[in-house]
Amino acid sequence: MGRVNKLTEGVFTSIVGNQTIIPSYDKFLNVQDDLKKPSQELKKLITQYKKEITSNKTIFEKLAKLEDVIMQIRTRDNLSNDMIKLNIVREYIYARIPFHRNDKESNDIRVIVGLTEFNGVEVDKMYDNKEFMDKAKNKLVEAMNEIINQNLETVNKID
């Protein structure tokens, strides 16, 4: 994983995990599988722990989803030109920024801003072009809003 960005790092998102990351509480319980026979005292505590996790799992999941949205809105609300990285792939000019995406491997969002045919291939000059950078920001905000709205719908469904 890349460097830590304070706008894309959460607490409960790490605890709950996602499709590719095992929840922290399951990792904690899985340690027991590698140990010798547990004592009655340990078995009792593990059973109690599992019961608490099970009864509170929905709360953890909702908190994680809320964190997702909070981190995403923080990024959107603090978007600045120095956060935007431009690059060219074939004839497409992309803009990307760090953006929390628990459902994706990379914590960023990317949009196509334009074509080299109309904007040239000198990326450094594009950063100085206010109209181009405003277009990049608007496209990024539009893409972020789409993801934020989907996540808000999910948060509202969890109970």
Image (cartoon, rainbow, N blue to C red):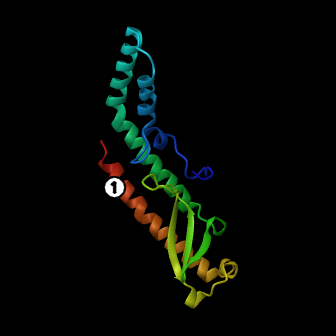
Q: Is residue 86 left or right of residue 107?
A: right
Q: Is residue 6 left or right of residue 103?
A: right
Q: Quadrant of the C terminus?
A: top left
Q: Position of residue 96 (x, y in %)?
A: 56, 67
Q: Residue at x 61, y 73 (%)?
A: 86
Residue found farthest to the bottom:
118
* Location of residue 149 with respect to 42 vertically, above or below: below
The one nearer the camera, 51 or 77, is 51
Q: Position of residue 127 (x, y in %)?
A: 67, 77
Residue tagged by mark 1?
153
Count the marks.
1
The one nearer the camera, 81 or 114, is 114
Residue found farthest to the top:
40
* Location of residue 83 with respect to 101 vertically, above or below: below
* Location of residue 103 with respect to 131 vertically, above or below: above
- Tag 1, which secondary structure? helix
Q: Residue at x 56, y 90 (%)?
A: 117
Q: Position of residue 81 (x, y in %)?
A: 64, 69
Q: Residue at x 44, y 64 (%)?
A: 145
Question: Quadrant location of residue 44?
Answer: top left
* Location of residue 129 with respect to 7 vertically, above or below: below
Q: Is residue 137 left or right of residue 150?
A: right
Residue type at mark 1 is: Glu
Q: Position of residue 148 (x, y in %)?
A: 42, 59
| Label 1 crowd (10 A; few <14 / some 14-19 / many >=20) | few
Question: Quadrant location of residue 17?
Answer: top left
Question: Quadrant location of residue 39?
Answer: top left
